[in-house]
Image (spheres, grey):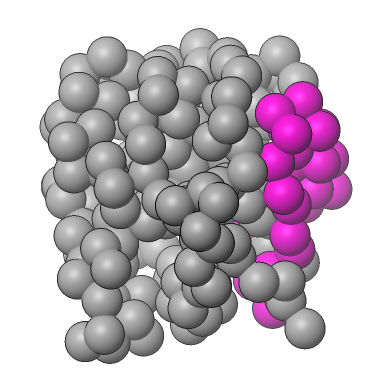
Amino acid sequence: MRVVLIHGVATDSRVWSGTIAALGSSVTVHAPDRPQSGDMDIEVAALAPLCEGAFVIGVSGGATLGLALAARGVEFTGALLHEPAAGSLAPGLLDEVARAFRRDGVAGFGQALYGPSWTPAMTTATSATVAGELAMFRAFEPEKVGHLADRITLTVGQHSSPARHQSVRDLAVALGTDRQVLPDAGHAVHLEAPAQLAARVRVTPRADLGSYVIPPFP
């Protein structure tokens, strides 16, 4: 089984160290460093070949890219997408982090989005890179994902804001996906509780989908 980990803004592949350790050696893990181009077409084109036929985990912007991949028909076997952007379903969702970025640059952005688990050492992104990525994700509008809805679970952290919980609920309804709440986690689940993500990759094959079903949390 292959697992692809997609990072968000102001992070890179290093943010997945805890998740990779928790996954262990039973799966093949790919944690690419995205181009961080600020162009959705470029990002999807870079990720699509790797995600085809794999189980995808994305957090924050990485989750948003997972939805973009699904909308464009990339046939992953399953996806766990944690707190993606929701476009017009939650138009003010990224306002707070945008204000933090204008006020305090990359450091302010990372702290506002990911909380105290994030440090500036987790990214090499410049202010220009973060500005481009933030604009890209603020412009994102979710599209129908067709039959891939059955393979996607949207998640939200137990300790995330009410706005995040509402956005994930509304997005799951709009797209027809599963939705789960991750206990003892917030937005930065890959930093706060990586074992929560790894546990969800231990899935049960489902022959009619040729894919995987994520079991519910206890």
The quadrant of the image that shows the C terminus is bottom right
Looking at the picture, how far across and down is residue 18, in whole percent? 33, 79
Residue 76 picture quarter: top left
Left or right: residue 78 compared with residue 40: right
Q: Could you tell me which residue is drawn at 40 percent across and 63 percent down?
A: 118
196 or 36, which lies in front?
196
Residue 154 seen in the figure? yes
10 or 207, which lies in front?
207
Looking at the picture, how far across and down is residue 154, in whole percent? 64, 49
Looking at the picture, how far across and down is residue 32, in whole percent? 16, 50
Q: Could you tell me which residue is drawn at 36 percent across and 75 percent down?
A: 19
The quadrant of the image that shows the N terminus is bottom left
Residue 72 picture quarter: top left
Asked if residue 184 is positioned above or below residue 77 in the image, the reply reads below
Q: Could you tell me which residue is drawn at 37 percent across and 36 percent down?
A: 75
Left or right: residue 1 compared with residue 69: left
**Is 175 in the magenta?**
yes
Asked if residue 22 is positioned above or below residue 174 in the image, the reply reads below
**Is 86 in the magenta?**
no
Looking at the picture, how far across and down is residue 155, in whole percent? 65, 55
Q: Could you tell me which residue is drawn at 25 percent across and 63 percent down?
A: 2
Left or right: residue 69 compared with residue 103: left
Q: Which residues are magenta?
A: 161-188
Asked if residue 94 is positioned above or below residue 160 in the image, the reply reads above
